[in-house]
Amino acid sequence: MGSTALPRDNPQRGTPQALLLAVESATPRTRVALLRGGTLVCERACEPGAPTAEVLLPAIDAALDEAHARLTDVASFGISIGPGSFTGLRIGLATVKGLAFGTDCTAVPVPTLAALALAAPEGPGPAVAMLDARRGEVYAASYQPGSSREDRVPCSVYGPEALAGLLPPVCRLVGEGALVCGEALQALLGPEVRLFPNVEPRAAHVGQLAFAALAGGAGCDPAELAPRYLRRAQAEVVRTGRTLE
């Protein structure tokens, strides 16, 4: 799927209009975006590696200020639910739940890999969104151009050999996970496997997918939001002695 630039608009100061607030906190660079009617109003990206707990609320405040809006103008939320950073996901979800508490706002859980795939450069074959799952494995899912539905690779944890058995010889590996097993997949599948390791999921794309879902009648009470971890945190493995899966 292509990485076409999202349109922007220029809201009038002091004109309250319903907004969608999108949060992406599953990856090292926390991001927030505001959309109105599917149109990007503004987007903020924090410094890579900055603690989500320290930067998320200030980023939301800065985005609202840039949009000349208030939190009460937000009618819905789009939230990246993983897989990804356990800590970042927990903080992102808790923040959205806290901001929505006591309101009638609607929330849309957006798979992080779907948002990542939407940022993929155009090209032949499916976009395979990939995040580092540690221990030489990746979180991965594939998407055909123009689609946000998982294709021949369902969202899960994969090693290079297992992933190679599902992928066509022409595909685009997108995200930090391409650094983990991209070269191995090229060796197994051939040179038409293209690597785009520097592509990151954007909050704008989280919002775009959330808006499309809302337009189709989807959405939930923010209190019902839950992360999509896919595996246990390493700290829990050490504490319990149970495996990552």
Image: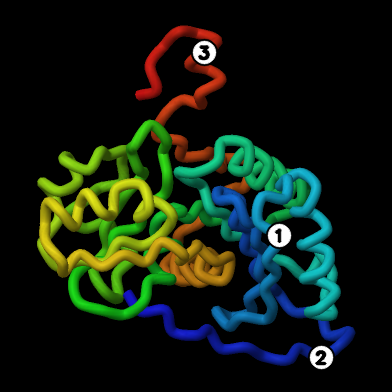
Q: Single out the residue that lies furthest toward the right.
A: 14
Most foreground residue, 158 or 219: 158
In percent of the image, x 59 and y 42: which residue is there? 89
* Lateral position of residue 82 relative to residue 105, left or right: left
Secondary element under disc 1, as helix, strand or loop, is: loop
* Lateral position of residue 220 relative to residue 43, left or right: left
> CA separation, marks 2 and 1?
29 Å
10, above or below 149, in the image: below
Q: Which residue is mark 3?
A: 238
Q: Position of residue 144 (x, y in %)?
A: 23, 68
The quadrant in which the N terminus is found is bottom left
Amino acid carrying label 2: it is Gln
* Lateral position of residue 229 relative to residue 202, left or right: left
> CA separation, marks 1 and 3?
30 Å
Q: Which residue is mark 2?
A: 12
Most foreground residue, 147 or 3: 3
Amino acid carrying label 3: it is Val
Q: Position of residue 29 (x, y in %)?
A: 62, 56
Q: Position of residue 221 (x, y in %)?
A: 59, 48
Most foreground residue, 235 or 213: 235
Q: Residues within 10 Å of mark 3 (few under 14, many from 20)?
A: few
The quadrant holding residue 91 is top right
Mark 3 or mark 2, which has the lower sequence index? 2
Q: Position of residue 19 (x, y in %)?
A: 69, 72
Q: Which residue is mark 1?
A: 47
Mark 2 or mark 1, which has the lower sequence index? 2
Amino acid carrying label 1: it is Glu
- Color theme of the render: rainbow
Q: Residues within 10 Å of mark 1 (few under 14, many from 20)?
A: few
